[in-house]
Image (cartoon, rainbow, N blue to C red):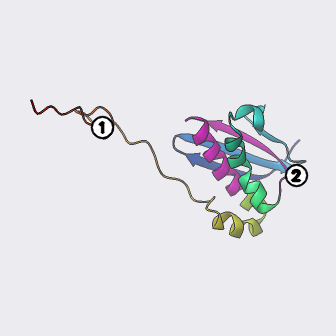
């Protein structure tokens, strides 16, 4: 029986990530795949790993992430948020460094809805004077 020592929920755009931290050797699994196999770009992998780098706990814990919704960039942001929250549950001393880097703030930017009479959220149809 594997015991979770920290659990965090992270959100970004329409993506939601549930993060479970366990004692281990630094393995990160996202939706059953390795972190590098799941995310397409090295930048997305780096975004997810940032909280671990900041707190100096890269090889201390195994991390299991279940993420749904949105695209890969939104999912990476959700993983960052959830992992940061979970690391605080593990050790309260991590709070200061994570807060200073802005990893605990929920990024509330969402896609604006499409309005009627417009081509998109704000884009108007081409105006013709004549």
| The quadrant where residue 51 appears | bottom right
Question: What percent of the width, then of the height, locates residue 9?
Answer: 64, 49
In space, the residues marked 1 and 2 are separated at their CA atoms by 48 Å
Q: Quadrant of residue 90?
A: bottom right
Q: Callout 1: 10 Å neighbours few (<14), some, many (20+)?
A: few
Q: Is residue 46 left or right of residue 59?
A: left
Q: Residue furthest front?
A: 130
The residue carrying mark 2 is 59
* Residue 20 image point, x, y percent: 75, 46
Q: Position of residue 65 (x, y in %)?
A: 72, 41
Residue sitting at x 78%, y 57%? 53
In-front residue for pair 13/45: 45
Residue depicted at 76% across the width and 36% down the height: 36
Can you say whether 102 is above or below 13 in the image? Answer: below
Asked if residue 75 is among those painted magenta in the image, a careful observer would answer yes
Q: Residue furthest left?
A: 130
Task: Return the x and y of residue 105 as percentages of the image width and height.
Answer: 57, 59
Q: Which mark is residue 123?
A: 1
Q: Quadrant of the C terminus?
A: top left
Segment tinted magenta in the rendering: 57-86
Q: Secondary structure at mark 1?
A: loop
Nearest the eye: 86 or 1? 86
Quarter of the image for residue 119 reads: top left
Quadrant in the picture for the N terminus: top right
Please check the rendered image and state whether residue 79 is part of the magenta-colored stretch, yes or no. yes
Q: Earlier in the sequence, mark 1 or mark 2?
A: 2
Assign a secondary structure to mark 2: loop
């Amino acid at each position: 029986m594997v015991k979770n020592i920290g659990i965090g929920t992270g959100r970004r755009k329409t993506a939601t990530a549930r993060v479970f931290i366990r004692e281990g050797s630094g393995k990160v699994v996202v939706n059953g795949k390795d972190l590098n196999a799941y995310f397409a770009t090295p930048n997305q992998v780096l975004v997810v790993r940032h909280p671990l780098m900041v707190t100096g706990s890269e090889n201390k814990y195994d991390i299991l992430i279940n993420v749904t919704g949105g695209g890969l960039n939104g999912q990476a942001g959700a993983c960052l948020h959830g992992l940061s929250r979970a690391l605080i549950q593990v050790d309260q001393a991590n709070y200061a460094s994570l807060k200073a880097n802005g990893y605990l703030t929920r990024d509330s930017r969402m896609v604006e809805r499409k309005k009627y009479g417009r081509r998109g959220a704000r884009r108007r149809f081409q105006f013709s004077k004549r």
